[in-house]
Structures are given as C-alpha cells and as structure tokens.
C-alpha cells in the first residue's frame, strides 16, 4: 500500500516537473524568434494598454463628476412672514429626507447683513423700511439625491411646500454632467471590447503560424504515438507567456502615461484653485489587468492550438 502511494507521488512529481520544464522551455522558444515575439508582445501590450488607459480616463472623469455633484444644492426661498415655528417644522421635515445631506439656514436678517458687507452700498440698504430679502434654506444633496431624476423629484416636492416661495436648482448642468459620464462609460466599454477581441485574434493567429511552421515535427510526433494533449502543451505555454509579458507591458505603458500626464493635470487644476491629482491604476486594478490579459491569451491559445493541431494528421 505504501509502495502504491509512493508511486502516485512520484508520478505527480514527474508530472509537475515536466510541466515546469516545458513552461520554461517555451519561454526559451520566444528568445529563439526574438523579432516576431517582440512584435506580438508589443501589439498585445498596446491592445491591453488602450482599454486600461480608457478606464483610467473614465475613473478620473467619475472622480471629477463626484466632486462637482457633491456641490449640487437646492436653495429654498421662504415666504415673507414665515414664523420661527414654521421654519423649525420645515427644517425637521427636511432633515428626515434621505436625499438631503446637510442643511444651512440663512435668516432674512443674516442675509441682509451679508449682502450689505458684500455689495458695498450698505447706506442705501439702510434707507429701506423693510427687509426685502427672504429667509433661505440651502440643501446639500446626498449621493442618492444627486441623480437628475431624484433631484427633479425633490425640487418638485420643495416647490409644493406651503412656506416655500421658490425652490431653485440648476438641473441643466447636473443632467449634462451625468449624461457625459454615462456616454463616456458606454464608449469605454465598447472600445475595450473591440481591443480585447483584437488580443484574441493576435494570439490565435500567432500560434496558428507557429503550428504551421512546426507542421512536420508535429506529424513525426504523432507517428511515434504522441497524443494531441502532449503536442499542444508547449504552444499553450507560449500563449501563456505572451499574455503575461504583454499584460506587464500594458501595465507599464499605462503607468508611464499617467505619470506623464499627472504634472500637466495638476498644473491645470491649480489654475482653477483645485488640488485634483490624476488617479492611476490601483493594486487590485493592476492585478485585474494582468489577469485579464493572461486569461484572454490563454483562451485564444487553447482554441487555436486545439483546432489546428487536431487538423494535422501524418500522411
């Protein structure tokens, strides 16, 4: 019984050693054809770097959009003669709404004092018998209330309040901003799909050419009894290396692009008194890029290699 266990362990060890040997032997195959290998890896790197760059663009656009949307506010101008009790009741109702993140109340007296200080003609305002300015609630919208549909519904509810004379929100810029980000998101998905399909085609076609160049060797191996699985293995490992190296190249190209643009973006943000910094790929996003490129290359390799090796039969 122990001898049988040892035999199984030996077979498993030999199987693993054989795979490791073929893995590194296939890497040596890339070095034996450096020009074609470098061209394939370069095409893969660029094809993967482009969707990664589009994703970085979308990520930064969403970050900027979130900052701008966080400043979305509804201004409630109250009716003249609104009592303190009515103001308190309205504030309590507003605080219970999930669409509202924060509430700022500016009384009519405070608004008049602020206007005097900002306008520069306090003496003219002192001649007025009554304060013409209404009390104002400034409502900062929460994340759930920043979407155009939710903001529009909230604005309609605020206009229906009996103590509110006018409720104002610039809906146009909020809708435009949301539409631009949605359009960019769809464009990124479409372009990324096309480029990732290009990765499949490049790897599949490269391995097809490799198999055709090794046609006679494959025929000889089949004549001496080699199985399709044994013959396919080196080609699959070549495809795996293409995916790994191409994905690392794509990650490096994306990193260089972000580093190159970060200084210009920071300088542009400084002109608008903003401290915005360009966001790059995080650790999980980088790992996902490398894993996606590797799996796509392996998938293309498996489909192309099995199909073309199966079609080769000794004459």
Image (cartoon, rainbow, N blue to C red):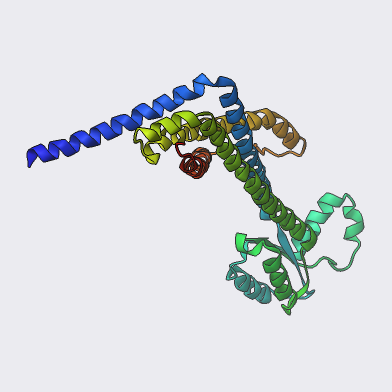
The residue sitting at the left extreme is: 1
Compare residues 50 and 44 and report the one nearer the observer.
Answer: 44
Q: Position of residue 69 (x, y in %)?
A: 69, 55
Compare residues 305 and 84 and report the one nearer the observer.
Answer: 305
Residue drawn 45% across the image and 28% down it: 217
The residue sitting at the front extreme is: 315
Vertically, is 267 above or below 59?
above
Q: Is residue 255 left or right of residue 16?
A: right
Q: Position of residue 241 (x, y in %)?
A: 48, 31
Compare residues 239 and 67 and report the one nearer the observer.
Answer: 239
Report which quarter residue 247 is drawn in. top right
Q: Position of residue 166 (x, y in %)?
A: 79, 71
Total marks in image:
0
Quadrant where the N terminus is found in the figure: top left
Q: Let me know if residue 60 appears in the view.
A: yes
Q: Position of residue 177 (x, y in %)?
A: 74, 55
Q: Is residue 267 left or right of residue 294?
A: right
Q: Is residue 265 left or right of residue 122?
A: left
Residue drawn 51% across the image and 33% down it: 211
Q: Is residue 12 left or right of residue 133?
A: left
Q: Let me know if residue 279 appears in the view.
A: no
Report which quarter residue 45 is drawn in. top right
């Amino acid at each position: 019984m122990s001898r049988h266990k040892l035999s199984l362990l030996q077979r498993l060890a030999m199987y693993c050693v054989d795979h490791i040997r073929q893995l590194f032997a296939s890497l040596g195959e890339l070095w034996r054809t450096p020009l074609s290998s470098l061209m394939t890896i370069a095409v893969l790197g660029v094809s993967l770097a482009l969707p990664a760059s589009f994703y970085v663009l979308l990520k930064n656009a969403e970050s900027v959009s979130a900052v701008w949307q966080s400043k979305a506010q509804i201004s409630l101008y109250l009716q003249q003669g609104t009592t303190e009790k009515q103001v308190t009741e309205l504030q309590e109702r507003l605080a219970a709404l999930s669409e509202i993140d924060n509430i700022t109340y500016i009384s009519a007296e405070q608004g008049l004092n602020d206007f005097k200080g900002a306008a520069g003609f306090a003496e003219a305002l002192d001649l007025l018998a009554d304060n013409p300015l209404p009390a104002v609630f400034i409502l900062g919208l929460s994340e759930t209330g920043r979407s155009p549909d939710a903001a529009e519904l909230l604005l309609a509810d605020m206009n229906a309040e009996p103590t509110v004379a006018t409720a104002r929100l610039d809906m146009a810029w909020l809708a435009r901003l949301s539409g631009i980000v949605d359009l960019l998101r769809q464009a990124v998905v479409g372009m990324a799909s096309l480029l990732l399909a290009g990765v499949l085609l490049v790897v599949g076609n490269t391995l097809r050419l490799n198999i055709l160049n090794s046609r006679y060797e494959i025929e000889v191996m089949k004549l001496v009894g080699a199985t399709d699985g044994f013959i396919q293995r080196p080609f699959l490992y070549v495809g795996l290396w293409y995916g790994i190296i191409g994905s690392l190249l794509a990650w490096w190209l994306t990193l260089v692009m972000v580093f190159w643009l970060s200084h210009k973006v920071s300088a542009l943000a400084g002109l608008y008194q903003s401290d915005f910094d360009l966001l790059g790929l995080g650790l999980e996003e980088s790992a996902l890029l490398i894993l996606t490129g590797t799996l796509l290359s392996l998938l293309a390799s498996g489909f192309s290699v099995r199909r073309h090796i199966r079609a080769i039969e000794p004459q």
